[in-house]
Image: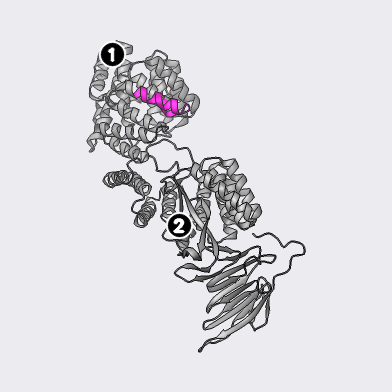
Amino acid sequence: MLAPLSAGAAQRQHTVLQINRQPGAGAGPTMTLPNAKPVALAVHQTVPDGARIDVPARITVVIASTDAKSTTTLRPDTSFTPVSTGAGEQSSIGHGSALFSVVHGALDFFQVKSDKFTASAKGTIFSVDTSKAQVSFACTRGAIDVAHDAKLQIDSNKRNANAKNRTGGAAKRSAGASGSVSAPTTVRTIDVLNAGAKWNVAYHPLVASDYVRKFASAAEAQAFYQTQVAAAQQSQDPERIAAAYNNRGNALYAEADYDHAIADYDEAIKLDHNLATAYYNRGNVYYDKGDLTRAIADYNEAIRIDPNYEYAYVDRGNAYDDNGDHARALADYNFAARLNPNDSDVYYNRGLLYDDQQDYDRALADYSQALKIDPTYSWAVSNRGLVYAMKGDRVHAMADYNEALRLDPKDADAYYNRGQAYASVADYDHAIADFTQATLYSPKDPDAHTNRALAYWAKGDYDRAIADDTDAIRLAPKDEAAYRGRGFAYWSKGDNDHALADYNQAIVMVPKDAFAYKIRGIVYLYGGSAAQAQSDFGNAAQLVPSDPYAALLLELANRRASAPSRLAQSLKAINMNLWPAPLIRLFLGQATPAAARAAAANPNATTAHAQLCEATFYSAEYSYLQNAKPDAMQQYRQVVSDCPRSISALAAAAALRAYK
């Protein structure tokens, strides 16, 4: 916004000098005042600020402003509005073309605006032409400044991942926990058009905002924009000063200097209340600070000023999504896609939202559309692979992970996800190799260490598993999964003291982790503390009443302690049509050990083997409780021999150590 009219400053006056008609011209030009109907425009007529002049085809209108300090020639099919008063002049061109002549030194400023640019001059002749294809400028004498929005690119990064902590789990999305990608910060770029240098500028309306201002580093950007602030202040042009503060704010934001960045955006907004880019950029900073309420408020203001501000819709959608308002997030992504159907980031973010809702078919469609627009979008192909994996399509998942790594050989998340895919088919060597790459390219990520630890554990390399979990704990001291995994590795080595210490810590961190209670209970069970085992198995059963294994383990502890059985009561919450129902029937006296083992048969060989391992272990437990210890010991040894990488085998090994 320009400076308000100072006391005593002359009001602008605009007078129609000429209306020139060409052969074949129809109705004449019109003038429309705010909230009024169009009226015919006549020669010598005075045009007030805020009135829109519409010039039809085959007609030219010449207007002199402020005692002819500037002259505007409106060409056929042009819409034009003078919008400001004071010692300078500001006008808006909606469409068409116009020629401007400005008397040098006669005005403090002269500006022409459209939705894509602001052109400023103090004395020159230049023309502006807008059409469906492009916005173009030509300078015939002197020089003008053209300000327009551009993406700020630091180093070689093409996209900005929203600043969030990533979480562990079966797989990772590229670019963050939710994976959402923020639209870029926006700078107000100033192009100087100098007739002596034969300069001209042209922008395509759909890609003008994609113009990129590049810097090698955030420090370089900050140094550049610091000088821009000083130069703008010397110009005394409030709008140019506002743009400079906005730009320096972006450079500070790139260096994560959030508070100083916000201060610069505040200054920009004070100087130009209608600078939508400053609201949008400040919203991005609030977003990264975790203040979603203020972020959404700023995005709202940017959209109020510019209802077609695509980036503001994208990032407001991200903020709504993080706030749990998925319906509004989806609405924003949908509107952004209508504004610009060629923005791959919009489809990427919407795909993530569908992914969160387990609407995998729509997620695949959006990731694929993002890749159709930008085949080099490595995050989209990596995350599409993740969706294929969730759908059980390992072939397409692996193909996408491979392609993602071809596009970006340093994509830690793609290595992580491919490592998970290898681990899921027990290809632990390749899994370890991929997790190792993930640790190299994301050295502060604990999850690659915890998952590599699992792969080492599966290979029987317990010491390396312990070392990886220890590294994960160093990186994330509150990582419950790392404590739980390290405790499991210690237990696998027979080191009950360290195992218990780690499970104690895991349960302190996550008091409702039923699995941790079950494993700690097993350690207690074979470590001679039946009462503590009872307590842990009881907690696990209470946390997940439908868990048949918690009920079975509690039964083992109760029988060792000569306590009343609770197994029959647990059947209300357990599905007895599924495995391990035959094992429950064994301890209810409704089946024999041989029948329980026979019931382990399954068409899937892997499933059949796992169930037989469990049936043999619980048969050993049944024999032990029946005082048939030789049979029990034989069956424990069989489980250890045939099922080396299972909880049943670890429990059997613990039993052999306890009962030797």
| Label 1 secondary element | helix
Q: Are marks 2 and 1 in contact (CB under 8 Å)?
A: no
Q: Specify whether 598 is left or right of 109.
A: left
The location of residue 626, given as percent across then percent down, is 31, 16
Q: Is residue 90 above or below residue 518?
A: below
Q: Mark 1 sits on what residue?
A: 629
Marker disc for residue 105: none
Decide whether residue 477 is among the magenta residues: yes
- The quadrant in which the C terminus is found is top left
In the rendered image, which quarter is residue 271 located in?
bottom right
| Label 1 CA crowd tier, 10 Å (few <14, some 14–19, many 20+) | some
- The answer to which image quadrant residue 414 occupies is top left
Counting from the top left corner in percent of width and height, residue 71 is at 61, 74
Residue 559 makes an appearance in the image: no
Which of discs 2 and 1 lies nearer the camera? The answer is 2
Which sits earlier in the primary sequence, circle 2 or circle 1? 2
What secondary structure characterizes most of the magenta part? helix
Instruction: Tell me the residue at 34%/57% (across/down).
Output: 372
Q: Which residues make up the magenta segment?
A: 465-482
Q: Which mark is residue 210?
A: 2
Depth check, front residue: 423 or 260: 260
Q: Residue furthest bottom?
A: 23
Camera-side residue of 258 and 230: 230
- Residue 355 in the image: above or below residue 85: above
Q: Residue at horizontal 43%, vertical 34%?
A: 573
Task: Name the foreground residue: 158 vs 510.
Answer: 158
* 328 horizontally vs 351: left or right: right
